[in-house]
Image: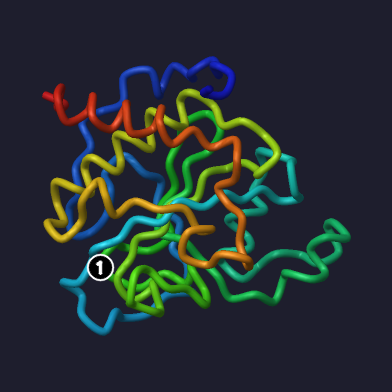
Amino acid sequence: MAGKAYKIPHHLQRLKTMIIRGHYLSSACQVASPNCDDRPDSDDISLLVIHCISLPPEQFAGDYIDDLFCNRLDPSAHPYFQDIYQLKVSSHLLIRRDGSIRQYVPFHRRAWHAGVSKYQDRERCNDFSIGIELEGAISVAYTDIQYRRLADVCRKLLEDYPKLSSRRIVGHSDIAPGRKTDPGPYFDWHYFHKLLDSCAANPSP
């Protein structure tokens, strides 16, 4: 079952048609992360990986995720940060609880989101994947607007990057089993794919 229905801010109620221009998503707020590099093959973008993150855990809002991905997280701001503030990590996108989207790395570059990972017979999933973080936790339901924005984003990525397909959308736990558990049991894959199919049947004007 999908998470609670968030009240959608006025500026998000009628999101403009999504456009990817120069590997940047037009409807995302751009926050450049230094934690990225060139892919071995910039044309080999063939996997979407869904994650979740909240800083501190199970606490939402604030700028701590930006701070982590941009290497400016203050270890004194919360005890949890003392163990993670030196990590060099990033993701391509973050979808917040209210449906707003932030982009940290352009899609043609390699974000550092998957870590030690394997999909089918290929290791190093960062080389060929796009990472999408949902603001959330494995113990908390996601919001309906997050599912809808995720479906919108994934459909646009599938349109623009031909090696992607709806069958190649996985959770972090699928490519790093035993090490990672996100997006967790509260992520409703059936609902997400229903929305994704709806996007395909009813493309944006």
Looking at the image, is 143 positioned above or below residue 42? above
From the viewer's perspective, is residue 48 above or below residue 114?
above
Q: Name the residue located 17 percent from the left edge and 53 percent from the top edge.
A: 21
Q: Residue at x 33, y 76 (%)?
A: 121
Looking at the rendering, which quadrant does residue 129 occupy? Answer: bottom left
Residue at the far bottom in the pictured view: 40
**Viewport quadrant of the C terminus:** top left
Looking at the image, which is closer to me, 37 or 40? 40
Residue under the point 54% across and 27% down: 143
**Helix or strand or loop: what does disc 1 sit on?**
loop
Residue 86 image point, x, y percent: 70, 76
Number of disc labels: 1
> Disc 1 residue type?
His
Residue 41: % across, % down: 20, 80
Q: Quadrant of residue 197?
A: top left
Residue that carries the numbered disc 1 in the rendered image: 108
Going by the image, does 68 lie left or right of 146? Answer: right
Q: Residue at x 76, y 50 (%)?
A: 56
Q: Position of residue 13 (x, y in %)?
A: 38, 18
Q: Is residue 146 left or right of residue 89?
A: left
